[in-house]
Amino acid sequence: MNLKYKRRYDSLKRSIKSYLLENASLTDEICHLQAELSRSRSQRLYLIERLMFHEGLEKPNTSRPGVTNGKIESSENSGATRKNKPVTVQKKSSEDKSKSVAIVRKKKSPFPMNLNSILLHSLGEIISVNPNFHNENWIYPVGYVATRIYAHPKDPRKKCVFTCKILNNAGIPQFQIIPDNDLDGVFFGESANTCHMELLTTIQRSPNVKVKIPFEVQGEVFFGLSNQKTQSLLMVDPGFPLCTNFKSFSVANSKSINNASISFETLQAFLT
């Protein structure tokens, strides 16, 4: 009888040892992946900040290195002058000249486009055959991507770059608001108002918020769909006339744009 329990004990001991080794291996792998993810987040945030600076939406950060030809250079080399190598010009034959004339330069993409407080990266595509992607006052193009600066969900006193996306989830629009320095805290839903309401609720519950903030849920305004330039671009889309349920765009007034639910500066007045 004792031998029976001893064999079970030895078996359990071997299993526990095996699980401990496997757990240690998984822990090491998770730590490695978290380090890679953190590095990728930092690089992405840096590139977005540089892009928004060049588009006039954010002040530069002089403590960070510059970017030249898509490569990050050190602060020591960023200010140094470079000598251009002499270029040898070779004469082209008449046949080469005729070929070069036929080359048409590719038109530069207008994106990203600076729309005041919004940086539009992709307009997306209108799905006119599906009534879920438009209503009487709004059109929700699939593939729409825009970024804007607003308060961080966990600490509203700090700025955060949010990426707003519209995706196609099995014939139903999925709206996403993604904070760049907290990719695990993505706000998503089947309407822009749902995402915006979740973001505002998270901010209101923050320990740094001591008062009740008069938030107004304005999902489409936060996404930038109320911007007149965005609406003008949508009207040029071939699918725009085919949106049978659509009547006219809703235009946001200055009061709604300067509301605490949209403007970072207005929100700070309630936090100070």
Image (cartoon, rainbow, N blue to C red):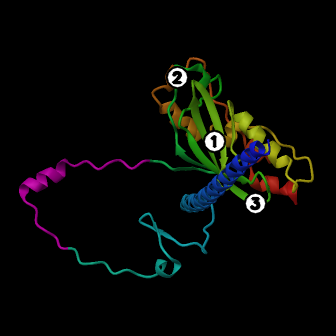
Kindly identify the residue that appears in the image at 7 percent across and 56 percent down: 94
Name the image quarter holding residue 48. bottom right
Earlier in the chain: of badge 3 and badge 1, it is 3
Tally the marks: 3
The three-letter amino acid code for the residue at tag 3 is: Lys
Q: Residues within 10 Å of mark 1 (few under 14, many from 20)?
A: many
The three-letter amino acid code for the residue at tag 2 is: Ser
Q: Which residue is mark 2?
A: 128
Name the image quarter holding residue 17. bottom right
Q: Which residue is mark 3?
A: 158
The three-letter amino acid code for the residue at tag 1 is: Gly
The N terminus: image quadrant: top right
Q: Which residue is mark 1?
A: 224
Kindly identify the residue that appears in the image at 68 percent across and 51 percent down: 14
Q: Are marks 3 and 2 in contact (CB under 8 Å)?
A: no
Asked if 271 appears above or below 118 in the picture, the reply is: below
Circle 1: element type: loop
